[in-house]
Amino acid sequence: MAKELLLQMLREIGLSELEANIYIWLLENKRSTGYKIAGQIGKPVANTYKALKSLQTKGAVISDETTGKTYFDTIPVEEFLHKLENEFTRKKEKIISEVDKLEVHQEQRGIYELNSKDLVYEKIKNMILTTEKVILIDAFPGPMKEISKFLNNVDDKAIYVKTYADEDVKYTRRIKAAIPDLLYSDLNGQWVIVLKDTTESLIAFFNKDCTQLVHAIWTCDPFLSFVLFNGSAYEFNCTEIIEQVHSQEHNKLEKIEGIVDHYKEMYKYMRLEEINFIKDKSSRRIE
């Protein structure tokens, strides 16, 4: 099972199936001739040497010809992966530079389905880092564990997080979901909802242990995002108030008043964004 997983991961980073099999064999057996490798893995000699040449080009394998025979061996896997990482970074920067030259602005006003768990978290990371005013996050423990990696490195952001378990995460305000008797082991999955600046929204649902993405949508449609943000903001506020209503504290009324006062600034922001949105839509219609 371990070899099958490693084989799959090596293929995912650009090795062919034959190259991956050769690489794994060399990792286990070390220094060997191409002829011996071909015999051990049951592949034609010509194909094996061709794959070894490709592995050399990719920086995964080195050769030694000092004895008159050509012996192959792997370089330390950390060096190989570091080389791939550097190459990817250079290519990424070049691609971004070339795309910028196109001077094309994409208005992604639709509702898009995300089919990759990694893409979901990359979107969330970007939403957190590009937040200008405030971001609302409603996340079950599984997704929250991943999101916390981004939140702990962010400063000067108004981050409101609604959680369903205790997490050590840095944010402006934490709202505890009022579901004390909920057993996550009984649920069919876990969700995460991220709402940024009333302009961008992401909703994703994972399976029970969060190893697979079940369904996810993302949109930067300003109208839909405003409606979703508006509803969640009031939900966050009500959740805090309900917690105080059911508390045993003597000064609960004072605390409820403090909660309401705190959210007044967010409501002012939402009202301003609503006015700006209506003005923008009206001006576009006139044009």
Image (tube, helix red, strand yellow):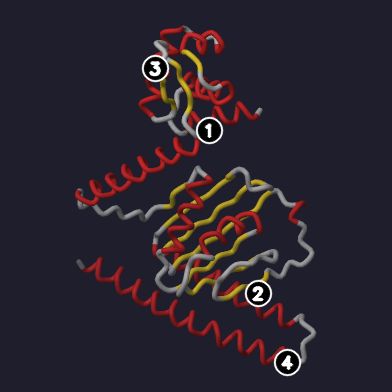
Q: What separation in Å lies between label 4 and label 3 (alpha carbons)?
A: 84 Å
Residue at point 25%, 47% (across, down)? 99
Quickly name the residue at label 4: 251
Disc on the earlier residue, 2 or 4: 2
Disc on the earlier residue, 4 or 1: 1
In terms of secondary structure, where does tag 4 sit?
Answer: loop
Q: Is residue 3 above or below residue 102?
A: above
Residue at point 56%, 88% (across, down)? 261
Residue 227 image point, x, y percent: 48, 67
Nearer mark to the viewer, of 4 and 3 = 3
Quickly name the residue at label 1: 9
| Type of the residue with mark 4 | Asn
Label 4 close to label 3 by CB (< 8 Å): no
Quickly name the residue at label 3: 66
Q: What separation in Å lies between label 1 and label 2 (alpha carbons)?
A: 43 Å
User: Observer-nearest residue: 138 or 96?
Assistant: 96
